[in-house]
Image (tube, grey):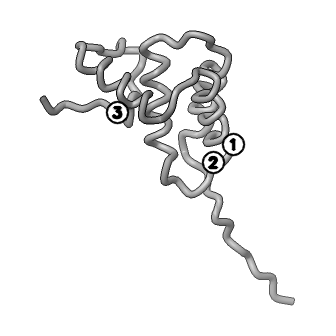
């Protein structure tokens, strides 16, 4: 008997476990700080076109709704945060994809 393996279109991201921890910490924040906004923006950038991780994507949307922000408003805020000389502490080495823009 031949068994066929069907590949799911849902992929698992290699950083999903650590990202889920970040999501869990953000989901309960009533008033986000700059680092919280930056973290959410980078996670949006990371997962927007990723074929999978629907739970993380749903949680991101819940956070935006809870914070009463649109994605565009969040990105405008994070661009302003970065332009005001925001620099994460050395303990936050994974801020890739946070809407950081080095152009003037």
Report x, y in % for residue 11. Answer: 61, 57
Question: How many C-alpha atoms fall within 10 Å of the one at disc 3: few (<14), some, or many (≥20)?
Answer: many
- Where does the C terminus fall, quadrant-wise? top left
**Separation (CA) of disc 3 from disc 2:** 20 Å
Badge 1 marks a residue whose secondary structure is helix
On the picture, is 100 further left or further right than 6?
A: left
Instruction: Give SS at disc 3.
Output: loop
Quarter of the figure with residue 8: bottom right
Q: Residue at x 67, y 70 (%)?
A: 7
Tag 2–tag 1 contact (CB < 8 Å): yes
Quadrant the N terminus occupies? bottom right
Numbered circle sitting on residue 53: 2
On the image, numbered disc 3 is attached to which residue?
A: 99
- Would you place residue 57 above or below residue 34 in this image? below
- Quickly name the residue at label 1: 55
Number of on-image labels: 3
Separation of residues labelled 3 and 1 (CA atoms): 22 Å
Please tell me in which quadrant of the rendered image residue 30 appears: top right
Residue at image position (29%, 15%) is 87
Task: Report the side of 101 relative to 42 (left or right).
Answer: left
Q: Residue at x 55, y 45 (%)?
A: 14
């Amino acid at each position: 008997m031949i068994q066929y393996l069907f590949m799911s279109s849902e992929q698992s991201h290699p950083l999903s476990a650590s990202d889920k921890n970040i999501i869990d910490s953000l989901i309960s924040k009533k008033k986000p700080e700059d680092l919280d906004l930056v973290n959410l923006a980078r996670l949006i950038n990371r997962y927007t076109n990723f074929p999978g991780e629907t739970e993380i994507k749903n949680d991101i949307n819940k956070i935006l709704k809870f914070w009463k922000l649109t994605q565009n408003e969040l990105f405008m805020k994070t661009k302003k945060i970065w332009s005001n000389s925001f620099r994460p502490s050395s303990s936050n080495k994974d801020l890739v994809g946070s809407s950081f823009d080095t152009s003037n």
